[in-house]
Image: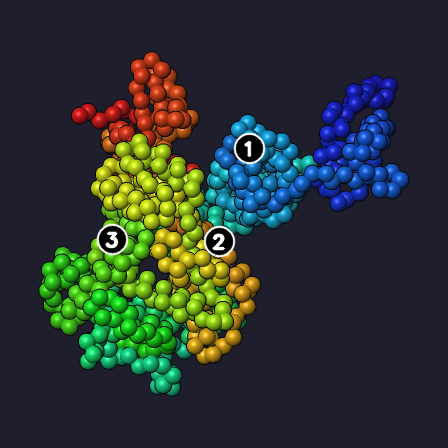
């Protein structure tokens, strides 16, 4: 609206008023509005606009599209079915809502997002069908924000007295407005953590304030702290929590020993990574007079020190897990517990919670016992040292793998224990495979870091017999503890680690991809599915497509989670399974310890709803930690590639989209993207059926799984993005 020189109003009418009024009433369908309130929503106050609103309201009421509940007061006629779901935003601003009411995700166009953000729990209605029969919808209400804090770079406009924070996440489609008095001493270009405070109705951007200045973009500590902050993960303990932990009595007392099974005379040892600082599990081994082997799985008794209702326990619960980044561990517990009192270090007495089994030569369990113990660890082995014993079958540890860097001879009884337990572990693993377990031995990427945390090299962590020995006995303890509680009658509340059967559509997608490499899968029934998946994983071992196929197979699986409602563990082929063996780094294990002791003491079943809530929190925090860990690996891969910009690498195409191809370098597993705009030798088009880019003139095909030669084009540490130039296919 503008004013002419005579002061009269020129008004062409409010465009699309009918739909606008319907949208306002539907979004707040439980509220009643008069024409003045509608006018205020629209930001108009002239007589012509008000008359237009009054007439439109009357027409809609006559058509019964809205209801006049009192004279001049209107509300929406609710004839639409509303649903609740979770918003998953795409980088281009559109999104999808994941909702149990719909078989497929519901598409939400960017103009129907209505200020919802990625991960928000929202109310929406599906108002039409898209092509291929998929539902499309509009968000009406934001029920719960997924997060209120974001990491980004601040741009300060001092003359205009405000700033904007541009978020790092490509899932965040808007910047954040920050008044100049809320920038918290940030300087232009700083990476900051900003909190959303409000999103005014007529504002294009939400308003916020800077909580913390993280540093300059691209600097190592800035980017690592930014990763933690992005997921709401702490990087240090509050002072009062540290003080509380440091005040705990961690001494081993005779009074407490009397309350426990004393196993200090049993031959006991730990096997852990070379660089481990906390040892939360130990094994003991004794040959009994009846010929059976008594094997103890001893787990740090964290719950002895971590008492419910304390600020220490509250902090551990909120964290729920330790976070393992490329250059550091963000622990669940302060160091006085994680690296000292609860760490089963050699030649020290420790309080433990144990699962003790009597086992025969066929790895059959003949007796079991669970309870609190005290142990004395006779020795600490690195995985490489235990592997040397297994491979050589003697007690000599060569210098190249020893913790001391010198050749030494270990105790013969300890060597014999390792060898016998290796035999039993292999029998147990074989039985798991026959029962339908799936063997995921995915290669892990690790970095050799110098004193300044620069990546000096990349290596791959693989699982050998020593790793699998520990894995099998930890699985045994987790399974048997879970069975012990799960089979009790009446039913007892417990914390299970469950893994549902894979989704059929994801398995079909997996078959489509691996079929390009000549592999065939059989999904006729559960047994044929697990057999063919295991055969696939064995067949690809050591081949160029291994990492791609391993990753896709894992993605085809359902996600493991914590719950009080047991459905078994598909991947392990266990009917009962819990996490019991890592309470230093996982809060669900602490809960399992507490519940087990409660039931051993004759306690009644715990509150299921309360523990289900705790399980959900633990699963969510585990997901955040996993994403932070992946981001830190991606960040370090890009730092590594910054020093190799002039080199050519052979990689495997791991993904093909209409905007480019993704390539993973074989020798270091770094993945980057080749933009279709940079493929300038021809005009390339995406062929969805072939999973390929196809040249229109030369007929060149770049297909999923093909080997290609690439060179680094650009490295972006801030966005954690790696771009390649495509040089072609390797010469035969």
Q: Is residue 232 left or right of residue 322?
A: right
The color scheme shown is rainbow
Q: Residue at x 49, y 44 (%)?
A: 151
In primary-sequence order, the first of circles 3 and 2 is 3
Residue identifier under label 3 = 463
Check the image and report above or below for 683 versus 42: above
Asked if labels 2 and 1 touch by Cβ distance under 8 angstroms, the answer is no
Q: How far apart are marks 3 and 2 (CA)?
A: 27 Å
**Of the numbered discs in the image, which one, if any, rests on residue 468?**
none
**Of the numbered discs in the image, which one, if any, rests on residue 620?**
2
* Residue 126, position as x, y percentages in the image: 63, 36
Q: Is residue 102 left or right of residue 514?
A: right
In this view, the residue farthest toward the right is 71
* Residue 564, position as x, y percentages in the image: 49, 62
Q: How far apart are marks 1 and 3 (CA)?
A: 43 Å
In this view, the residue farthest toward the front is 524
Q: Nearer the viewer, residue 269 or 475?
A: 475
Crowd band around label 2 with a 10 angstrom C-alpha radius: few (<14), some (14–19), many (20+)? some
Q: Distance between the residues labelled 1 and 2?
A: 29 Å
Q: In this view, does 194 lie to the left or right of 35?
A: left
* Residue 118, position as x, y percentages in the image: 54, 42
Image depth: mark 1 or mark 2 in front: 1
**Of the numbered discs in the image, which one, if any, rests on residue 134?**
1
In primary-sequence order, the first of circles 1 and 3 is 1
Q: Residue at x 41, y 46 (%)?
A: 502
């Amino acid at each position: 609206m503008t004013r002419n020189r005579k002061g009269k109003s020129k008004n062409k009418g409010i465009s699309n008023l009918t739909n606008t009024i319907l949208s306002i009433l539907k979004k707040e369908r439980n509220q009643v509005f008069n024409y003045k309130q509608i006018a205020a929503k629209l930001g108009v106050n002239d007589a012509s606009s008000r008359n237009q609103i009054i007439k439109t309201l009357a027409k809609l009421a006559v058509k019964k599209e809205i209801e006049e509940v009192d004279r001049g007061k209107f509300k929406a006629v609710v004839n639409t079915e509303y649903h609740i779901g979770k918003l998953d935003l795409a980088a281009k601003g559109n999104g999808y809502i994941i909702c149990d009411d719909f078989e497929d995700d519901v598409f939400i166009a960017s103009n129907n997002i209505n200020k919802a953000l990625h991960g928000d729990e929202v109310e929406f209605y599906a108002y039409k069908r898209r092509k291929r029969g998929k539902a499309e919808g509009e968000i009406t209400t934001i029920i719960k924000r997924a997060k209120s804090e974001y990491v980004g770079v601040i741009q300060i406009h001092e003359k205009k007295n405000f700033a904007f924070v541009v978020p790092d996440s490509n899932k965040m489609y808007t910047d954040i407005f920050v008044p100049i008095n809320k920038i918290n001493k940030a300087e232009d270009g700083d990476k900051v953590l900003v909190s959303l405070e409000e999103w005014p109705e007529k504002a294009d951007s939400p308003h916020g304030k800077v909580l913390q200045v993280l540093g300059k973009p691209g600097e190592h500590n800035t980017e690592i702290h930014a990763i933690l902050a992005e997921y709401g993960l702490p990087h240090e303990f509050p002072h009062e929590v540290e003080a509380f932990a440091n005040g705990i009595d961690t001494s081993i007392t005779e009074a407490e020993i009397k309350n426990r099974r004393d196993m200090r005379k049993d031959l006991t040892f730990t096997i852990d990574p070379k660089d481990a600082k906390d040892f939360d599990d130990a094994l003991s081994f004794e040959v009994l007079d009846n010929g059976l082997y008594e094997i103890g799985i001893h787990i740090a008794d964290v719950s002895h020190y971590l008492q419910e209702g304390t600020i220490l326990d509250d902090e551990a619960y909120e964290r729920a897990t330790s976070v393992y980044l490329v250059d550091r561990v963000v622990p669940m517990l302060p160091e006085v517990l994680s690296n000292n009192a609860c760490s089963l270090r050699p030649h020290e007495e420790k309080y433990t919670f144990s699962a003790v089994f009597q086992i025969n030569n066929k790895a059959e369990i003949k007796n079991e016992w669970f309870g609190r113990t005290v142990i004395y660890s006779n020795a600490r082995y690195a995985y490489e040292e235990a592997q040397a014993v297994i491979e050589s079958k003697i007690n000599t540890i060569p210098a190249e793998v020893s913790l001391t860097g010198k050749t030494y001879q270990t105790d013969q009884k300890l060597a014999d224990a390792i060898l016998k337990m290796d035999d039993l572990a292999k029998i147990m693993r074989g039985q798991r495979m026959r029962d339908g377990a799936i063997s995921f031995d995915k290669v892990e990427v690790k970095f050799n870091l110098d004193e300044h945390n620069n990546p000096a090299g990349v290596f791959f962590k693989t699982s050998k017999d020593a790793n699998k020995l520990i894995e099998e006995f930890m699985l045994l303890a987790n399974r048997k503890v879970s069975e012990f509680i799960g089979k009790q009658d009446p039913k007892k509340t417990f914390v299970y680690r469950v893994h549902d059967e894979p989704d059929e559509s994801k398995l079909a997608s997996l078959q489509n991809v691996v079929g390009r490499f000549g592999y065939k899968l059989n999904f006729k029934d559960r047994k044929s599915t697990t057999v063919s998946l295991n055969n696939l994983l064995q067949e690809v071992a050591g081949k160029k497509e291994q990492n791609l196929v391993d990753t896709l197979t894992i993605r085809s699986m359902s996600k493991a989670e914590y719950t009080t409602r047991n459905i078994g563990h598909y991947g392990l082929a266990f009917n009962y399974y819990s996490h019991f063996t890592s309470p230093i780094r996982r809060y669900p294990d602490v809960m399992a310890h507490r519940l087990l002791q409660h039931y051993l003491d004759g306690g009644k079943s715990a509150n299921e709803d309360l523990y289900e809530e705790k399980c959900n929190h633990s699963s969510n925090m585990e997901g955040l930690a996993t994403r932070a860990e992946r981001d830190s690996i991606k960040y370090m891969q890009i730092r590594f590639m910054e020093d190799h910009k002039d080199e050519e690498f052979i990689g495997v195409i791991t993904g093909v989209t209409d905007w480019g191809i993704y390539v993973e370098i074989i020798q270091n597993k770094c993945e980057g993207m080749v933009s279709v705009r940079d493929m300038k030798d021809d005009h390339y088009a995406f062929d969805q059926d072939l999973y390929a880019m196809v040249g229109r003139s030369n007929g060149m095909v770049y297909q999923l799984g093909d080997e290609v030669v690439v060179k680094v084009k650009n490295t972006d540490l801030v966005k954690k993005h790696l771009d390649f130039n495509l040089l072609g296919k390797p010469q035969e």
